[in-house]
Image (tube, coloured by chain):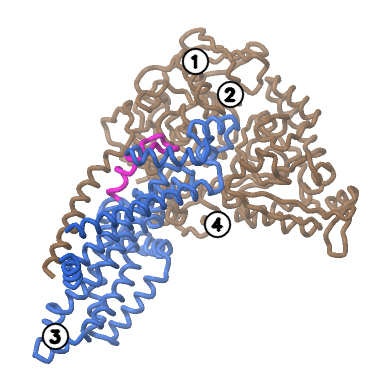
Chain colours: A blue, B brown
Amino acid sequence: MSSLLRQIAGRLLSGLIVLWMVSVLAFLIIHAAPGDPARMLLNANGLDAPPVEAVEAKRRELGLDQPLLKQYSNWIGGIVQGNFGSSYHSGKPVWLMYRERLPATLLMAGLALMLSLSIAIPLGLLSAIKRHSLLDHAAQLLAVIGAAIPGFWIGLVLILVFAAKLRWLPALGSATFKGMLLPAIILALPNIALTSRLVRATTLDVLNQQYIVTARAKGRSEHGLLFAHALPNVAASLITPISLEIAFLLTGTVIIEHVFAYPGIGRMAVEAALIGDMPVLGLAVLIAGGIYVIANWCADLGMAALDPRLRQHRQSSTG
Amino acid sequence: MRRFGAQLLGLILLIQLLIACGTASETAQTITSTNATSEQTANPNGVLRIGTGINLPVGLDVAQGSTGYNMVTYGAGETLMRFTVDNKLEPWLAESVSALDATTWQIKLRQGVRFHDGSELKASDVVTSFNSSWQNLSAAKNFIPADSKTTVIDDYTLNLSTSQAEGSIPYSLANWNFVIHKPAVNGVSVLTGMYQPISLEKDQELVLERFANYWDGQAGLQKISVKKIPDANARALALQSGDLDMLTNVAPDLASGIPVDIELQSVAGTRMHYVMLDSANPPFDDRLVRQAITLAIDRQALLQATLDGQGAVATNLYPASVGIELVEAQIFDPAQAATLLDQAGWIVGSDGMRSKNGQALAFTLHSYPGRAEITLMAIAIQAQLKELGIAVEVKEVTDIGEIVEKGNFNASMYSIGTSPDPQYTVGTTLIKGAAYNYAGYSNPAIESAFAELRAEQDHAKRIAIAKRIQTEVKNDPVNIYLASPPLITAYRKGSLSGYVPNPNDVYLITKELKLNQ
């Protein structure tokens, strides 16, 4: 038990170190980006250049005239104390902006995950069972297309077909089922491609295992073999990629939200990047880092829960 | 397996919970105007849904940032004066603006103008509004000096006195920095326009509804929804799909690919794209070189290559669209350009490039990505000047302000919004210490003409002075005027009526604009 606690504490500590490194990198990269945030903010409407004295006053107001180290310590110190600061642009508390936008992003990522799993797993299984069939080749083609074509391009094509031509779905994203269906499909496509191929490969691997051959020799039906023996093993091996897939879905919304004008945190992060709104953008990067850290933790826990070999290993090492 | 199924079920339940939370939060993220008074009757003309790539206002307080610009654009805010479609100055909330003497202007207000809170506009409200603009908007004092005095004569009359003669006051009263407003309560200014803002979702949507007590009769639309859609292609597709009724600021290259059932309205705007030259340092400290460059650029070819031929070429410091009589100074004349360079001692070598005393005629042209066509223009200029033996290196930077403010440039692409007021462009670009005179250019003839222009109140005389300044610009150029980009609006054919394109993009929404059923 103490070993488990030690492991959890170790994971927590390494996660915090990763997040700290992410915060330093994010802060430095945002500050190294060309452009003076004060001027960009004052000229956010693309109107004429703001007066020099107004830019200077804005720099002082935002604390941008302070040394870099001081700016970083103010920012990260605030976050540690639960004060995420205020947007340079709107003056609104950053946590409030995220609270407003996060549900929309979670909704779309959730729908994309459901689509991805409900298509990729059956497709991968069928491809494995019907190996080298027409279906298998079609699935392979889909996987290549899904993995190779950029999401923003597919997004525009799907808007053209389903919104502009057929008028079945809205061209603009919104936090309704119809409004997030197209963006969710596009977000899910690369994951469908990768997961279906992974399921196929893992299933084929499992189906060739000795215990499956034995079960088959004992007269177990193919259906029974697949669902009672193969699938649990396939599921265990999918925990890590699916955890990372969730992280990818949450962080991969940035471009999709931009194309569909979807009201989520991804679009908010892009808008913040365009005008140098450090408190908003910095937190977006930290959240993205945090999602990956948590996804890795979840993968470890999931593996431990689903894979008896890992449980036995832990028990033997503690006992 | 059972555990996996339970996890999946849990995930579905979590998503459903989030759907519920998301729906609830939809209504929570808006700034809502407390001044909104809903109409009792529904307008069959419905809601005009506009898509734009331009930032929406940060809030609904016109004394902050460029919110005043947005509010005038979408029919919520009004100024005392305004410009017509052909850029003539006319009274708006004012009934008249007249000069009492060299430094005093008397403003008579239109009677019966109502604020969105139902109160009537009085002279004291104008004083409060001006004070708010001077106090909060850094650019306001560039139009009307902040040390000006306002005196209420009666409920509908006030005097505006300046410390020195300011002939441009009637024009400045049309500037959006002087939108007439009551100071904000809970972040929302009280305005007088035909539409009143009712909600704003940051970076998402601005919604306005018709103001029932508008002083000039009922506006043609029940509601207006302005959505920011960052991707230009997605905006165009949303218009085709029927998710939007109107697009503003359509890119010229996109405009050429829009289907036949979409109506496009293109008008050359009042913005000016130009090249600033560092007249203090070589090679542009030589007036002959500056003159030669102004003649070496084929502006029509630039327009064709970068703006799909739309917009208008510029030949002097005023865009053709602002309605000021032009002196055509900067026209394409490569032979004359070559002669001037020869006179200046820049001789063509065996490699076709010019040099003097072993020094090549070369410079860096800074550009920036803020407007898509700017860097394309810089590249086209590079190619055109190479024909004349001038080597140009184009360098794109994110923040052009940082470069020009430090005076750290040979030549730089730039763009400013101009005004039908002939004083504005001179006063902001050519006068020593002017906001956009980054090279420190100074020409005594222009300085003296500007002083005259500033003091003159008679329009015809102002135009005559402006012509003298334009002639001096021809003799001693510091900026190469290139083109005015187009303002392109798109909507489905037959879906709108009453829309009149205006070179001033700040007058997008008019009372006559309505949706056809």
Quarter assignment of residue B389: bottom right
Tell me the distance, in whole angstroms, between the alpha carbons under discs 1 and 3: 87 Å
Where in the figure is residue B276, as x and y percent of width and height? 71, 42
How crowded pointer 1 is (Cα within 10 Å; few <14, some 14-19, many 20+) is rated as many
Number of other residues with Cα within 10 Å of mark 4, as a class: few under 14, some 14 to 19, many 20 or more: some
Q: Which mark's residue is nearer the viewer, 2 or 4?
A: 2
Q: Amino acid at mark 2?
A: Lys
Q: Label 2 lies in what chain?
A: B
Q: Residue at x 53, y 34 (%)?
A: A59
SS class, disc 4: helix
| Residue position for label 3 | A222
Q: How far from the left and from the top, in percent, is residue A78?
A: 37, 38
Q: Secondary structure at mark 1?
A: helix
Q: Is residue B297 left or right of residue B238?
A: right
| Residue type (three-letter) at the residue carrying disc 4 | Asp
Q: Is residue B314 above or below residue A163?
A: above
Q: Quadrant of the N terminus of chain A?
A: bottom left
- Point out residue B4 in the picture as x, y percentages from the top left corner: 16, 66
The residues bearing labels 3 and 2 have C-alpha atoms spaced at a distance of 83 Å
Chain where mark 3 sits = A
Quick check: is A185 in the magenta stretch? no
Specify which label sits upstream in the sequence, 2 or 4.
2
The numbered mark 1 sits on a residue in which chain? B
| Segment colored magenta | A85-104
Residue underneath mark 2: B141
**Tags 1 and 3 on a common chain:** no
Figure quadrant of residue B83? top right
A8, B204: nearer the viewer: A8
Q: Secondary structure at mark 3?
A: helix
